[in-house]
Amino acid sequence: MGLRWRSSLLSVAITAAPLVLVACTADRKPDDRPAGERAAPVELLVTPADQARDVPVSAEVGTAVKGGRVTAVRITDDKGAEVKAEPREDASAWVPNKPLQPRRTYTAEVTATGDSGKTVTRKTTFTTLAKSTKPAITSTLYFSDGRTYGTAMPVTVAFDPPIAKQDRADVQRRLFVKTNPAQPGAWSWVPDGSQVYYRAPDFWRPGTTISVRAGLQGLPIGKGRVGDVDRTATAKVGRQVALEIDNATKQMSVRRDGKLLRKIPVSLGKPSTPTSSGKMVIMEKHDFTTFDTRGEPDGGYVVDVADAQRLTWGGEFIHGAPWSEGDQGNRNVSHGCTNISAAAANWLMGVTQVGDLVTVKGTEVKLEPGNGWTAWNVSWDDFVKGSALPVPAGLRPAPAQRPHAAAGSPTPVPSGTGG
């Protein structure tokens, strides 16, 4: 329900009033009606429990109803001001739009309507914790308000330190994404817990609006830490641009909406510092920047570059490299970046957006999970395996087809039973 309280849940049951029947047959007591004609009682469960104390500021008003549905929720603070909240998709809880304030008292009034039309209202009053003194886990939302992104842009949240496997479900419950038009997606964690990505099975449609909230402020994470702050952003998806870089031909193909715009000669990483093969996303764009690799393996140089577009955390960029123009299209001489001419790099900066897909193939090494925004470097079936929560039915991978038994062979028998 979004909250797990050890205190007992509030409950109430309402039975519908007897139905009066007028007929020529003998009178029948209401309790004698067939079971199918009786209205089920309403059972309403609410959290936090009444008079609960030391409630985290990330608290939600959890609701569960049998024999009816929740029809109204009103949350107010100790000064009578209303706290705006929205229901989860499964109506298991109402989530305040902003974190609650520390050391404040709140009242939630929940109304449920039974199948018979009867209503029941229950109030619960609870008090939040003082401001936490536990160390916070730093979160970074790589999704900025008001920007326009490419169609491959994953919603990315990074964590320092990484989130332990047993704590990822609690964190994931507090990550919310809305898309217009609706394009349902799923979250997936990189193996070390340092990043979690959200994407749909296919690329975003141009013109889509995406709203994100990482509602982590005050969230208990494990035994010793809390979430740092709530982060929100709303952005749009722009045109579809995709870059394809082929080591075999030493060429980059630039496509917009599926149409080839241009081919650009490239020089990739030399054998000792190869470029990664895989599906990446443009992460940053810089008109000018400085590469300083002193202290890094195979580094030790400082160079100013123009028109640089980041692809990985490890330092792979597409950028203008006038010093290697004689090698571009012929041989690989870089330290892992994709070198293109100064003129081509300047042109490309006017075509691409952060969030555009870049596919590199045919190099000596494969892209490592989490080295950049690697959400597209796996199939959808493998992507959803990284979710810490059950994936909605409509987004789950299709079940594997069982092979037909050969004629005369016994029918395969499952090795076990259960869910």
Image: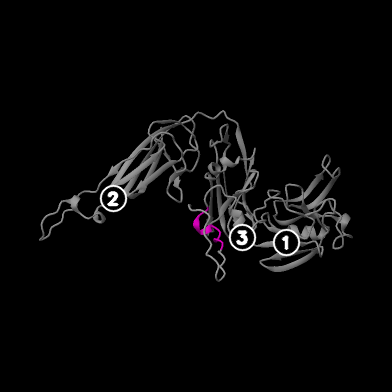
State left or right for residue 70 relative to residue 188. left
**Looking at the picture, how far across and down is residue 188, in whole percent?**
60, 50
- Of labels 2 and 1, earlier in sequence is 2
Can residue 100 be seen here? The reply is yes
> Residue 40: which numbered mark, if any?
2
The amino acid type of the residue labelled 3 equals: Phe
**Looking at the picture, how far across and down is residue 57, in whole percent?**
49, 35
- Disc 1 crowd rating (10 Å Cα; few below 14, some 14-19, many 20+) is many
Query: Seen from this angle, which residue lies furthest front?
Result: 408
> How many numbered circles are shown?
3
**Looking at the picture, how far across and down is residue 167, in whole percent?**
56, 40
Q: CA separation, marks 3 and 2? A: 45 Å
Q: Which residue is drawn at the image coordinates 50% and 55% (left, top)? A: 392
Quadrant of residue 206 in the image? bottom right
Residue 303 or 203: which is nearer the viewer? 203
Q: CA separation, marks 2 and 1? A: 60 Å
State left or right for residue 86 relative to residue 291. left
Name above or below for residue 147 compared with residue 50. Answer: below
- The residue where tag 1 is placed is 243
> Residue 264: which numbered mark, if any?
none
- The residue where tag 3 is placed is 203
- Disc 2 crowd rating (10 Å Cα; few below 14, some 14-19, many 20+) is some
**Looking at the picture, how far across and down is residue 366, in whole percent?**
74, 54
The amino acid type of the residue labelled 2 equals: Ala
Name above or below for residue 407 compared with residue 201. Answer: below
Q: Nearer the viewer, mark 3 or mark 2?
A: 2
State the extent of the magenta-drawn residues as a range. Answer: 391-400
Residue 411 or 15: which is nearer the viewer? 411
SS at badge 1? strand
If the image is split into quadrants, where does the N terminus sit?
Answer: top left
Q: CA separation, marks 3 and 1? A: 14 Å
